[in-house]
Image (cartoon, grey):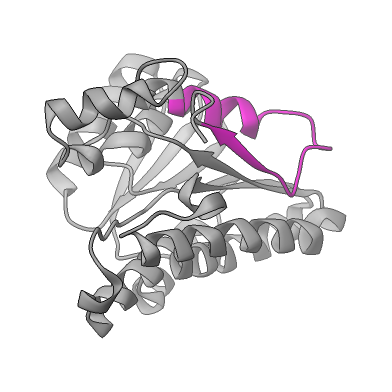
Amino acid sequence: MNETVIITGASRGIGRGIATAFAKNKCNLILICRNSVDKLNDLAMTLSEEYGIKASCIACDVSNPDDIRKYSNEFAKADILINNAGFSYVGLLQDMTDDDWKKVIDTNLSSCFYMSRAVLPSMIQRASGRIINISSVWGNVGASTEVAYSASKGGVNSFTRALAKEVAPSGIQVNAVAFGYIDTEMNSMLSDEEKSDLFDTIPVGRPGTPEEAGEFVCKICFSPSYLTGQVITFDGAWI
């Protein structure tokens, strides 16, 4: 397809699965992470060699608008933006510091605003583009001891619906995927016993994989243009 896809938080987990799925579909990649640059470079090299696509890496803090402005020329190339960067805080609300709250909101929600603002002018000029925001089932229903995370993902859902209405006349699709339990490093804090108990509550009896997550995001991205403004749940019938 040779379209250019920007993926934030691409070095591991769902982001890595998404990058692989788009590479299989012959899309060129601009992969972004904040810290794991060596891991990201290795991924870019592997995908380039295996699928014959172009893959570049950018070390950028997408929660910082000044950092994003440095790469405005690169981001203007995007045909597709996947806002995947995320951060989770598990703990009681009264124990959260101001910085804890700000980090979750800025990483999960504000980054969607900063990155979408960066790519939209060129998409609007071309009257074409797609944005997919990675959300969570906790953005739909909330989770105890994950209040900030749930609030940020609920914000992502509303951001998605509102932006879709705003840019639909310009030929741009905006959707979100609300994931359930995906087997990633972010969820690795659970013990084997806790995981077993959790899987008993998921009707399909297992977690989703990053590969499945990536393939699903890719399918949503390339669905008919009438699909926009949707928050689509992918959770094995869990919630």
Magenta residues, as a range?
Answer: 213-234
Does any portion of residue 46 appear in the rendered image? yes
Q: Where is residue 52 in the image (x, y as percent from the top left)?
A: 39, 19
Q: Is residue 159 left or right of residue 153?
A: right
With 102 as the anchor, is 133 left or right in this view?
right
Measuring from the top left, give residue 97's x and y in whole percent.
Answer: 22, 81
Residue 15 coordinates in the image, percent (x, y) = 36, 39
20 vs 63: above or below:
above
Viewer-closest of 114 and 231: 231
Residue 226 position (above or below residue 157): above
Task: Examine the image and state in which quarter residue 12 appears.
Answer: top left
Q: In front: 33, or 180?
A: 180
Residue 234, x across and y down, in percent? 53, 31
Out of 123 and 114, give the one closest to the viewer: 114
Q: Is residue 235 magenta?
A: no
Q: Which of 46 and 136 is in front in this view?
A: 136
Q: Residue 46 occupies which quadrant of the picture?
A: top left
Check if residue 227 falls in the magenta segment.
yes
Q: Residue at x 87, y 56 (%)?
A: 169
